[in-house]
Image (cartoon, coloured by chain):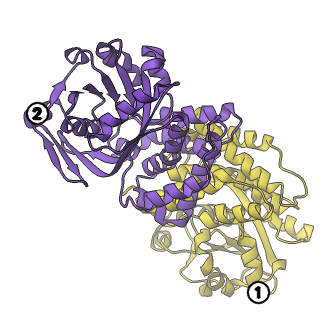
Chain colours: A purple, B yellow
């Protein structure tokens, strides 16, 4: 299968490398890593065993990639206004688009731009960070759950899942992508937000009882808002406790938003906070802690440690 | 009147200097400023006009002060465990104790230690910071409201108020000290907390609409908790808007807790946050933002900018 990776950060590089190793024709749209990867290839330092991809098809624009079977979108959501230009040259009649981006609103945007019938979404439970140019660090997990944005042919969905699973990525399908998205937010809202705000890793938050309780209180707010969104099946409060235990197992981990803030980049506050808050508000669900957290993140913009 | 100032920070030095200028016999219990003040006196840089107190009665222990008519307590509340030793030598049968400290719990502690009948509390609406040793900066306001911890003879209360007002401090009395304390918290909780957390001045918080709304939401939480405490008269929601306007007039101001954090000192989280939260909890008032704020302040202890 011919696959384009749009947004080659830690997530795009990691899954792209696995897909290429799995035998697919993978093209990477690159920016900062272009020179390093074209000269020296791509190295994945993985808890499952390091590997090296010597020959990478890297591109500076989508035009040189041409049309593909599958576009995997890993862009930071604050760059979504570039989506149209980056993806348009890749689209033929049968091209499918899978966004693995954070938060809410990405499928909607892709559907508006390229038609809803070709849009899939997925959430990745992946701990990874970029290293030196041309290096990506896979620190743990990596499972993906994918689903159609709208009603989606089951066989087609399973075929795309098998592209990942045959490449060594655990990939399951869901018929309730909305629920899966919100479940991911149950993790992302507290951990991305608090780690970025306090510049502390997940284990530092969880070891302090007061802060662990705050994490759980935030999770319950997100679950309450999620369950007001007309999901096929409600998310239970136990899910919060399972996520706390799952995160205990991560050890010293910096979520992507913590890294973004540390490096002075923009934060994905719109997709991870503002759109979920708006969906909550529309259903009259009060999310005071979530709202306070994003206000503090936005307000703290000017006081980055330098 | 013979007066001892216990806790000669920005507040203690400022009011002590005014009382001495007003003709009272004032003794200051000093620590870090002792050498500077004994050599060079005390300089007040005030928006109402600078003045200089050349000869200050400074002490390193309360024993050399002896018994006094009035003890004015300006200690940081995290030093309250020193109160007994610091104040005991100053107490005679008729000595009165006025605490101008922040938050809740101070009158209770003084009453336990020295008897409730001699305890008064006051809140100071004062913008002041310490400068170099021996210098204090009065940046604005300065009004005091005082009241008895318990039922208190009105004439006696008015006499103490007149000690201040005849020395140039606007001082009024209240028969509902509890309400006055909570009204001060309506300011202290959002501004001390957020300014310390974000290391931003009050004007920086107020100029951002999202953060201004968060300040107001915190104020409403405090007002709701206050009104569950059996006050003589409820605090209206308008009080929040009046405090916002009052603070707009302060310009670039660092609340004391912001300065404490900046200088790596302990924070007054117990008196300003934890005790009010506990009083709220006892009346089943939920204060999610207030609780989140103190958790973030406590959690952030380890990540002070250095």
Q: Chain of mark 2?
A: A
Q: Position of residue A221 (x, y in %)?
A: 62, 47
Which residue does the image show at 53% across and 61% down from the upper left?
A212
Mark drawn on residue A38: none
Q: Position of residue A152 (x, y in %)?
A: 48, 25
Between B80 and A221, the residue placed more toward the observer is A221
Q: Along the horizontal axis of the image, is B10 left or right of A169?
A: right
Task: Check disc 2 and report the residue beneath it.
Answer: A55
Q: Along the horizontal axis of the image, is B306 left or right of A180?
A: left
Mark drawn on residue B92: 1
Which residue does the image show at 51% across and 34% down from the upper left?
A177
Above or below for A286 versus B121:
above
Q: Along the horizontal axis of the image, is A10 left or right of B293?
A: left
Count of numbered labels shown in the rendering: 2
Mark 1 secondary-structure assignment: loop
Dot in front, 1 or 2: 2
């Amino acid at each position: 299968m011919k696959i384009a990776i749009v947004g080659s950060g830690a997530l795009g590089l990691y899954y792209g490398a696995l897909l290429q190793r799995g035998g697919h024709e993978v093209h990477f749209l690159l920016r900062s890593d272009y020179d390093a990867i074209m000269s020296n290839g791509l190295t994945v330092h993985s808890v499952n065993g390091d590997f090296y991809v010597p020959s990478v098809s890297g591109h500076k624009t989508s035009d040189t990639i041409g049309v593909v079977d599958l576009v995997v979108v890993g862009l930071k959501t604050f760059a979504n206004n570039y989506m149209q230009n980056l993806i348009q040259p890749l689209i033929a009649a049968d091209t499918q688009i899978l966004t693995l981006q954070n938060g809410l609103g990405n499928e909607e945007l892709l559907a508006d731009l390229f038609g809803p019938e070709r849009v899939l979404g997925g959430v990745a439970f992946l701990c990874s960070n970029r290293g030196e140019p041309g290096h990506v660090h896979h620190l743990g997990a990596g499972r993906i759950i994918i689903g159609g944005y709208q009603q989606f042919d089951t066989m087609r969905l399973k075929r795309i899942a098998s592209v990942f699973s045959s490449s060594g990525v655990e990939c399951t399908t869901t018929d309730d992508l909305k629920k899966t998205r919100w479940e991911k937010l149950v993790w992302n809202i507290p951990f991305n937000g608090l780690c970025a705000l306090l510049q502390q890793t997940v284990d530092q938050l969880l070891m302090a009882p007061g802060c662990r309780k705050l994490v759980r209180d935030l999770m319950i707010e997100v679950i309450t808002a999620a369950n007001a969104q007309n999901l096929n099946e409600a998310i239970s409060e136990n899910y919060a406790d399972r996520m706390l235990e799952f995160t205990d197992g991560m050890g010293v981990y910096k979520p992507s938003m913590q890294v973004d803030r540390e490096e002075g980049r923009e934060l994905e506050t719109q997709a991870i906070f503002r759109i979920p808050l708006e969906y909550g508000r529309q259903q009259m669900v009060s999310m005071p802690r979530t709202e306070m957290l994003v206000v503090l993140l936005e307000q703290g913009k000017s006081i980055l440690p330098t």
